[in-house]
Image: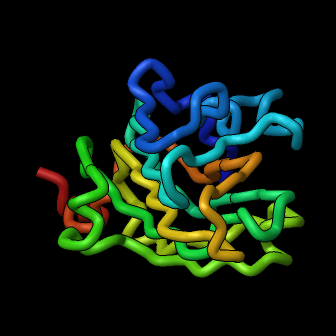
């Protein structure tokens, strides 16, 4: 059963590159803040944002919610990377992403969950979210909510399954 992974985010190590002063990543991620559309994450010098989110436990991420109310400044192309603890902007062109998502204005307005490829997000310590551009080609990108849904726990290892009676 997928649940909100908010309680497993290590906020003390949260990193967001190119965030505008007073409009940082915690406003889009933290419970309470992310439910208020007037509190938002915004990019600073151009339209790109890069969030590096560490978890306190290994997680399996099943879906992501990204919500934005300013359609022209809403994220368009988003690339997700797993277990790259110090991913920087220069790495996004050379390191293959786990999944690329092209968001529609309708998905962003409703904040609908977007399913992820489970095999790529099965054993995640760090999730990096690279917002490459926005819907309207605007100078900055703005979003008011990011939520991650999945489960915690160890990875199920099929190789360790033994037939009944084969135990040593």
Residue located farthest toward the left when viewing the structure as drawn: 168
Q: Residue at x 57, y 62 (%)?
A: 62
**Residue farthest along the top direction in this orientation:** 12
Identify which residue, 159 or 32, lies in the foreground. 32
Give the side of residue 18 with respect to residue 32, left or right. left
Frontmost residue, 159 versus 83: 83
Name the residue at 76% across, 46% down: 144
Q: Residue at x 44, y 30 (%)?
A: 14
127 lies above or below 76:
above
Q: Specify the quadrant that holds the N terminus.
A: bottom right
In this rendering, does residue 156 appear at all?
yes
Quarter where residue 92 is shown: bottom left
Picture colour scheme: rainbow
Residue 136 drawn at (x, y percent): 70, 76
Please determine whether, in this image, residue 40 is positioned above or below residue 111: above
Between residue 124 and residue 12, name the one nearer to us: 12
In the image: residue 3, left or right of residue 90: right
Query: Where residue 17 sits in the image (x, y, percent)?
Result: 41, 42
Question: Residue 155's spot in the image, x, y percent?
Answer: 35, 53
Q: Is residue 162 left or right of residue 20?
A: left
Give the residue drawn at x 48%, y 68%.
132
Q: Is residue 36 above or below residue 162?
A: above
Residue 1 appears in the picture as rendered:
no
Q: How many marks?
A: 0
């Amino acid at each position: 059963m997928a649940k909100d992974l908010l309680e497993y985010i290590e906020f003390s190590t949260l990193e967001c590159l190119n965030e505008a002063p007073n409009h940082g990543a915690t406003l889009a991620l933290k419970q309470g803040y992310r439910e208020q559309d007037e509190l938002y994450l915004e990019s600073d010098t151009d339209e790109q944002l890069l969030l590096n989110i560490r978890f306190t436990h290994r997680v399996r991420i099943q879906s992501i919610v990204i919500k934005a109310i300013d359609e022209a400044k809403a994220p368009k192309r988003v690339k997700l990377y797993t277990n790259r603890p110090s991913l920087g902007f220069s790495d996004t062109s050379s390191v293959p992403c786990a999944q690329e998502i092209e968001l529609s204005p309708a998905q962003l307005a409703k904040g609908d969950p977007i399913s992820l490829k489970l095999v790529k997000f099965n054993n995640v310590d760090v999730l990096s979210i690279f917002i490459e551009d926005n819907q309207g080609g605007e100078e900055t990108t703005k979003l008011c909510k990011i939520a991650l849904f999945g489960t915690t726990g160890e990875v199920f290892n099929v190789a360790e399954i033994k037939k009944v009676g084969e135990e040593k």
